[in-house]
Image: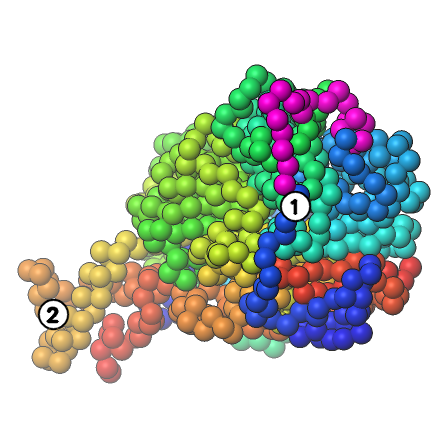
């Protein structure tokens, strides 16, 4: 055991690999070169189209103990990962690792295959029941939670070699050219799959929409794809939307959004060239709404909107408030439709989006990002992975990447979640280090990280309710009381990897 | 102008809803009216007043004016409301159905008795009477003069239109006479006037139009049924940038005048004297509340050194 710089105990090894304790957000310098894979040759007349998923798995050479990957652009509407795991199980393979870009509640179907040993573990974060059961000790499989940028890094540097990537391809031709823009399972950007296509040893395109050669525009080219296979259905795009896509009407949420928008304005970021990222969700969209009207009012021409893209950002692009959208993932149908028709709506890979180990990611160019939290502590460390019951329920997404990259990262959260205070002495799990968080906005006050002294003074000058984070905590606890700390076993059920590959925290089994 | 208190937004909060009461500190309205009357069903009258009492006792870092709308004094709940809530020190009472001066005088007497019993300064609890019937509107002048505790008159259009047997329209033409009469009574007495609620929470355009009308007539504030309405109302009542600049020039001019030993001076070809200064001071106080100027104007700047 070693303590990392945030005081969390990190074991020396996990799942057979040595761990590096987290030190600070920017210090680790990468060494070596990007990962390599075998050269290939495809002669004229040779075919890639296979007749079934089973045949494709066999052709890919998948063996016991190997690693597979899928993308999560269909989010909770993805059918593919469940089908592949079921097929692998039927073929009698065992000890397979999943290194998908994310795993969603719909993939709870995998659980019996974890119990039976078909699936050995996850080289990615998980949303929903799998994490919950792991934290309760009901299933046993290693989970390495990664940020979007961190996952791209781990694949590109070769620390997580993907043996076979299965890519859900909503629009695909028989030679493997594909995009996500069109077809019954259109999901828009294939930003995560672009990494897998480039670095996996074998690449299988799976489609429910085989179209005549060639598919244009090309998101992932034929040169990277070994096999093509047709299935009846890739997924249900209606389930891409995970949270609400409407601006909240809750007065508390609106109050938070109003403060957040005023913080952005006070920070002096609202000027020509403004770049911005928010998630989906009612409060984030309410912030976007307020930013949008402030941009209109001031005739501000923004630079780009980024991230998971919503219809809201599409509207802002079309209105001329942004000159481009940088889209690693579409969050709703409006975004999916836009990326297929608007050249200024640019698809970007997870590498370009957020990988810390390249010549510069898009997150580095962000002025401001709006982020959520399940808990925040008095050092501004943020938890988005576990809930206050200790269960691992959420993947990190781009949280730590954008917080590190943006000039100003703003956490928006109601001061009370359930009956519990959002600000704690110590968050259950550290996802994102406090040194990359600028401001925490709740309806009861705004806490500013000391590194933004000028902003803090400006907010006070504008009579916004600026409070020390400890003061904010005390005020909330006067309403909620102080919660009793959770108790954990020693057993580590998951590690939380920071974007640079160091370990920022671990998730331990909850004492029931 | 001593004791000037900005009351642009007076937000109703039901007294029987703990989840809403606990959020009172977070909204940036100028006043809150915790309701024990219409929002509270008969079966919860008793529980609500105790809930409100405990909320007020625990709300120590008060950041806005707190009024309680009690049940009318001729109901069996009105007196009990006062008895339970006053020891928790609200700033004032919103009196519904204040149809006659006598009704207000009765509340005034009761408040004096409670103040003596609680050993607090006489006059500590203010009164905001609701003029919400034909009779109340007719009696506006008498009501305004019925108690020194009254800091504003509030017009209540919902009950008023009911008493007139008419429908309330979006344009509000049918309210014009009543609104004006309430205003005259308030202005003649030198107190504030608070406009009625706008019930359609989703119609922000309608709210803005109605608030603009009220402001043009002379109202200084508006009652609200939802926190979402605060922003629009504050926006309407916010002074315009050119008004603030002019007001600053007026204050500067009058200070220059005093140095010259006079109380009148010309500014841009117009005379600046006491009423102009008073209006400028009012603009600057409102501007201060909106964060448009950094310092609060002091009495000496307005009236000169004694």
Q: Of residues B243 and A419, which is closer to you in this image?
A: A419
What's the residue at 13%, 76% (across, down)? B256
Badge 1 crowding class, 10 Å Cα cut-off, few under 14, some 14 to 19, many 20 or more, is some
Answer yes or no: are tags 1 and 2 on the same subunit. no
Q: Is mark 1 on a helix, strand or loop?
A: loop
Residue B38 counted in the magenta span: no
Q: Is residue A78 left or right of residue A261?
A: right
Furthest-bottom residue in this view: B306
Which span is picked out in magenta? A39-58
Name the magenta segment's main secondary structure.
Answer: loop
- Quadrant of the rendered structure where residue A435 is? bottom right
**In which quadrant will I find the C terminus of chain A?**
bottom right
Residue pointed to by mark 1: A37
A300 shown above or below A229: below
What's the residue at 61%, 26% (across, down)? A43
| Chain containing the residue with disc 2 | B
How did the renderer colour the structure? rainbow
Residue pointed to by mark 2: B264
What's the residue at 57%, 54% (across, down)? A355
């Amino acid at each position: 055991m070693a303590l990392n710089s945030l005081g969390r105990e990190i074991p020396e090894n996990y799942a057979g690999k040595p761990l590096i304790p987290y030190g600070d957000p920017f210090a680790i310098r990468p060494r070596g070169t990007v990962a390599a894979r075998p050269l290939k040759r495809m002669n004229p007349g040779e075919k890639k189209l296979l007749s079934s998923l089973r045949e494709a798995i066999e052709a890919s050479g998948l063996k016991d103990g190997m690693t597979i990957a899928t993308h999560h652009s269909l989010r909770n509407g993805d059918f593919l990962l469940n089908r592949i795991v079921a097929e692998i199980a039927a073929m009698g393979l065992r000890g397979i690792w999943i290194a998908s870009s994310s795993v969603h509640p719909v993939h709870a179907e995998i659980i019996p295959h974890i119990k039976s040993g078909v699936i050995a573990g996850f080289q990615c974060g998980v949303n929903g029941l799998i994490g919950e059961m792991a934290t309760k000790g009901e299933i046993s499989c290693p989970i390495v939670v990664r940020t979007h940028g961190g996952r791209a890094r781990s694949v590109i540097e070769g620390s997580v070699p993907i043996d076979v990537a299965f890519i859900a391809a909503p629009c695909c031709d028989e030679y493997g050219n594909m995009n996500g823009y069109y077809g019954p399972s259109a999901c828009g950007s294939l930003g995560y799959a672009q990494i897998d296509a480039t670095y996996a040893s074998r690449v299988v395109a799976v489609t429910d929409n085989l179209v005549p050669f060639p598919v244009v525009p090309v998101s992932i080219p034929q040169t990277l794809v070994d096999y093509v296979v047709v299935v009846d259905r890739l997924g249900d795009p209606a389930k891409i939307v995970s949270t609400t896509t409407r601006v909240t009407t809750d007065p508390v949420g609106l109050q938070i959004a109003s403060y957040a928008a005023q913080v952005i304005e006070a920070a002096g970021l609202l000027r020509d060239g403004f770049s911005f990222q928010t998630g989906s969700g009612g409060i984030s969209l309410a912030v976007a709404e307020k930013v949008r009207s402030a941009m209109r009012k001031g005739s501000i021409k923004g630079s780009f909107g980024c991230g998971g893209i919503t219809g809201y950002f599409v509207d802002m692009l079309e209105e001329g408030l942004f000159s481009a959208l940088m889209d690693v993932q579409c969050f709703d149908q409006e975004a999916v439709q836009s990326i297929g028709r608007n050249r200024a709506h640019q698809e970007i890979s997870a590498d370009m989006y957020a990988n810390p180990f390249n010549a510069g990611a898009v997150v580095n160019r962000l002025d401001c990002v709006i982020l959520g939290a399940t808990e925040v502590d008095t050092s501004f460390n943020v938890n988005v992975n576990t809930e206050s019951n200790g269960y691992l329920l959420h993947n990190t997404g781009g949280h730590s990447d954008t917080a590190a990259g943006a000039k100003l990262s703003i956490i928006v959260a109601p001061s009370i979640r359930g009956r519990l205070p959002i600000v704690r002495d110590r968050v259950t799990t550290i996802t994102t280090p406090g040194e990359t968080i600028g401001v925490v906005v709740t309806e009861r006050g705004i806490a500013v990280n000391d590194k933004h002294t000028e902003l803090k003074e400006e907010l006070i000058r504008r009579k916004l309710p600026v409070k020390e984070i400890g003061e904010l905590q005390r005020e909330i606890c006067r309403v909620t009381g102080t919660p009793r700390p959770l108790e954990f076993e020693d057993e580590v059920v998951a590690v939380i990897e920071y974007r640079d590959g160091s370990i920022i925290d671990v998730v331990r089994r909850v004492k029931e | 102008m001593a004791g000037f208190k900005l009351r642009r937004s007076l937000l109703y909060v039901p007294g029987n809803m703990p989840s809403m009461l606990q959020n009172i500190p977070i909204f940036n309205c100028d006043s809150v009216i915790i309701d024990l009357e219409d929002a509270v069903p008969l079966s919860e009258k008793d529980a609500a007043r105790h809930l409100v009492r405990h909320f007020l006792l625990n709300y120590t870092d008060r950041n806005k004016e707190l009024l309680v709308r009690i049940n009318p004094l001729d109901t069996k709940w009105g007196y009990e409301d006062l008895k339970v809530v006053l020891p928790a020190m609200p700033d004032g009472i919103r009196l519904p159905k204040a149809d006659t001066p006598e009704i207000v005088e009765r509340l005034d007497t009761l408040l004096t008795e409670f103040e003596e019993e609680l050993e607090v300064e006489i006059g500590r609890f203010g009164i905001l009477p609701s003029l919400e019937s034909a009779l109340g509107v007719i009696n506006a002048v008498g009501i305004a003069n019925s108690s020194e505790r009254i800091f504003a008159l509030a017009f209540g259009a919902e009950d008023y239109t009911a008493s007139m047997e008419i429908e309330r329209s979006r344009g509000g033409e049918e309210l014009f006479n009543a609104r004006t009469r309430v205003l005259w009574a308030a202005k003649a007495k030198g107190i504030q006037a608070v406009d009625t609620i706008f019930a359609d929470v989703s119609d922000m355009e309608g709210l803005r139009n109605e608030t603009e009308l009220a402001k043009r007539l002379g109202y200084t504030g508006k009652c609200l049924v939802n926190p979402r309405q605060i922003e629009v109302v504050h926006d309407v009542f916010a002074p315009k940038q050119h008004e603030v600049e002019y007001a600053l020039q007026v204050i500067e001019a009058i200070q220059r005048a005093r140095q010259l030993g006079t109380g009148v001076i010309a500014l841009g070809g117009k005379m600046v004297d006491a009423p102009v200064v008073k209006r400028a001071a009012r603009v600057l106080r409102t501007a201060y509340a909106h964060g448009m100027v950094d310092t609060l104007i002091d009495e000496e700047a307005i009236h000169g050194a004694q």
